[in-house]
Image (tube, helix red, strand yellow):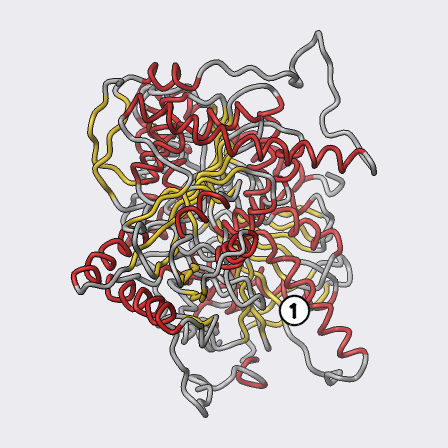
Amino acid sequence: MVEQKVVFESGNELAAYAAKQINYHVMGYYPITPSTQIAEQLDLLKAEGKHDIVMIPGDGEHGAAGICYGASTGGGRVFNATSANGLLYSIEQLPVQSGTRFPMVLNVACRTVSGPLSIKGDHSDIMYALNTGWIILFAKDPQRVYDYNICALKIAEKVKLPVIVAFDGFFTSHQKRRASIFLKDEDVRDFIGELKLEYTALDKEKPVSIGSYMNEPDVINNKYQLHLAMEEARNVIPAIFKEYGKLTGRTYGMVEGYKMEDAQAALFILGSSYDTARLAVDKLREQGKKVGVFTSNVLRPFPKKELYDMCKNVKAIIVADRQDSYGAEGGNMSLELKATLQDYKANIEVASLVYGLSGKDFYIEEGMEMLTRALEIANKGKVDKRFDYYGHYKGKTGHKIQQYFDPIIGEKARPGVTSVSIDEKTGKMIVKGGIVKESTKMPKRWTAGHGACPGCGIPVNVNMLLRGIEGEVVLLFQTGCGYVVTSSYPKTSFRVSFIHNLFQNGAATLSGLVEMFHEKQRRGEIPKGDNFTFIMVTGDGGLDIGMGPAIGAALRNHKMIIMEYDNGGYMNTGYQLSYTTPKGAKSSTSHVGVAQAGKATFHKDTPQIFAATNIPYVATVAESQPTDFIKKAAKAQKYANEYGLAFIKALSACPLNWGDNPRYERSVIDAAVNCCYHPLYEVEQGITTITYNPETRNKKIPVANWLKMMGRTKHLTKPEYSNIVEEIQKEIDRRWERLKAKHENPLL
C-alpha cells in the first residue's frame, strides 16, 4: 500500500486536491454554486505554486465545455466542474466529446435545476446526463469524491470515454469529513500511468479530421462503437477499483448494500442519503424487522446484473429518487431499476417516492418510514400506490394573492422629473430637469425590504436609473445579487412587473416580451395609448455568459434598455473573477501568491462593445454624478421607446468583495471616474460625447490612487507589483485618449 495521510476536507476540496495531484494540463471552468469551490481551491493551490494546471475561465458553462473539448483533442488531460443549469447549458457539448472518444473528467456537484431557481442539492441535473455517452460515477461521501476522481481518469483513458464524478451538492460538496489521501503526488501519477491516445490534433506527422460530418450508415456504427466502449467499462471499472483498493485499502464495487443478505424489504437510494438510510436499517433491525438498503456507485454503465444480484431475494423495494422524470411516474432510478427487474423476470414489488428536492433534509426517521412502507408492501404482496412525492405539503385552498403595494401607473408614474426633446439643429436629445432633489418625487419601483449587503451599489444604481424613467416599467433581472436579494418567495421587493431568467438568456427573454407587447398592440389586444419601458438589469458577470444574447438583442435593435451594474466579479457565487474584474485584482479564482498576481487580463469595455453594434444610445453613469445619471436615464428611455435599444453601464460598488468601507463607496466610485477607469460619456446616434472630463476640472488622478482604496487591489501598491500598475495605467490612458479622439471627431 502507498503512504497516505488523513485530512479533514470537503468533497469539493478533495476533488481539487485530486486534480492537483494528477496535475491536469487544462481546466476550463465557469463558476456555479455548489461546484465553484473546486475551481477556487485549485486556483489557490496554483497561486501557491502547487500545480501547473492552466485554468481558463470560460464565458459560460457552454464555453467552458468547449474549452475542455478543444484541450482534450490536443492529447492532454482535462478537468472541469459544474452543477445544475450549468450542466444543462453545457450538455450540448457532452455527446460531442463522447462521440469522438476523448477522455476527460467532469465533477458535478448535483443541484436542483431551475426554474424556479434553487441552489440546493438534488439529482435533477445529473439525470439529464444519462444519455450523453459519459461514464457516470456517484460518490456518496467526500472520501469517494477523492478516490473516484483518481480512478475516473484511469477509467476514462482505458476505454476512451469521458467520465463524470457526481456527488450531492452541499451535503457532500461542502461538508467536511476525515479522508485519507495519497501522501505523494507521484504515487497518484504512477497509478494513472502515461496518457497514450491514438490520434490528437497536435500530431504534425499524422493530421486528422476530428468530428467528421456523418450520415447513415456511418453514425450507427459510431454509436455502436460507443456502446461497445461503455460495455467494456463494465469490466474496466471493477478492475480499476480493485487495483486502487490494493494501493489504498479502499475497494469499491459497482453497487453496494447494507444488511441485504436476508432482507425482505429494501430501500434503493443514491448519494449521501445512503448512510442515513443505513442508520434507519439499524433502528428497524433492533425491532426485528428484516430490512436493508442498497445503492449504486455507478450510473453509467448501469450495473443491471450487480443490482439484481443485490436485491433478488427481497419481496418489495421502495426507490427513493431525488428527482422526477415528470409524467413517467418515477424518477430515473425508479424507471431503470424497474426495467432491470423486468429483464430478470423478478417477482419483486416496486414503489417510487420522489423526496429531498432542493436539498430538503433526509432524516433517519424518514428512512425508517420508507423502509416500513416497503415492509408493508412485502407483507401484503402488492403495491397500493406505486408513485408519490414524499415530504410535500398541501397549499392553502382559496388563497388570494396579496398585492402589497398600489401599482405605479398613470400620473403616479409620471411626476415630471424629466422631459426630453430633440434639438432640431444637432439631432441630439435635450433633457430638462433631472435635478436630484426633484427626482425624489419619483416613487420607488424597487422598495425597501431587500436583502442586499450594506453599501451594495445595485439598489443605488437601479433606483437612480429609475428616477429618470417616467411612466410604466417592466423589469427583467438576470441571475445575480440584484435578483437574489429581491425576489425570495413568496414576497418581492418590486412594485412593478418583474421577470427573471438565467444569466445566459436575459436579453433574449426581454426582447421576446417587447415584441409580444408591440404585436398585441398592433392587433388591438392592448390599447394604442398604453406603453411600457422595458429594462433588463444585468451584472455579476451577466455580460460574460449573457453577452451573446445581449449582442443579438442589440443587433436586432429591440426597443428596450439594458442596464449593467458592473461590480467587477461574479459576486452572487462568492466573488470569482469576471471579464470586468480589474487586472491584478484578487478574487476567489484569481488569488495572489508566489506564482500568481491576481487577474491576468484587462477589464472588458462593454460600452464600446455595444457602441460597435450601432444601437441608438450608449452611456456610462456613476452614482457620484447623480444629475448626469438621471438625465442619461431619461435619454435612454426616449431612445428605447422610439428608436431601439439603449445600453447604460454603471460602476457598482461591492464593499464585501471590493474590501472597502461601505460608508465611503461614493468616493471610491468618484475616484474610478476621476482616474478614467470608468469615464463618463455617451454615444448618441454614433456620436461620442464625454460628459465629464476630470482633466479640464483638474481632478484627474493616477489609477494607483483608486486601486489603493480597495482591499482587492491594495496589494498592487507594493513595489513588486509596480509593473502591473504601470500596465493598467497605460491601458486606461490608451482607452481615454481614444475616447477623447472620438469626442473631438464625430466620424470616429
| One can see residue 621 in this view | no
Q: Residue at x 72, y 55 (%)?
A: 616
Residue closer to the observer: 438 or 12: 12
Residue closer to the observer: 383 or 608: 383
Q: Is residue 435 left or right of residue 457?
A: right
Q: Is residue 590 left or right of residue 564?
A: left
Q: Residue at x 52, y 28 (%)?
A: 156
Q: Residue at x 24, y 42 (%)?
A: 176
Q: Is residue 220 left or right of residue 78?
A: right
Percent coordinates x, y for residue 275 in the rendering: 27, 51
Residue at the top extreme?
205
Mark 1 belongs to which amino acid?
A: Val
| One can see residue 259 in this view | yes
Percent coordinates x, y for residue 402 in the rendering: 44, 86
Q: Is disc 1 placed on a helix, strand or loop?
A: strand
Percent coordinates x, y for residue 386 in the rendering: 48, 71
**Which corner quadrant of the image does residue 357 belong to?**
bottom left
Kindly identify which residue carries mark 1: 420
Q: Residues within 10 Å of mark 1 (few under 14, many from 20)?
A: some
Counting every numbered tag in the picture gives: 1
Residue closer to the observer: 508 or 286: 286
Above/below status of 703 relative to 449: above
Q: Is residue 257 left or right of residue 428?
A: left
Above/below status of 1 relative to 513: above
In which quadrant of the rendered image does the C terminus lie?
Answer: top right
In which quadrant of the rendered image does the N terminus lie?
Answer: top left
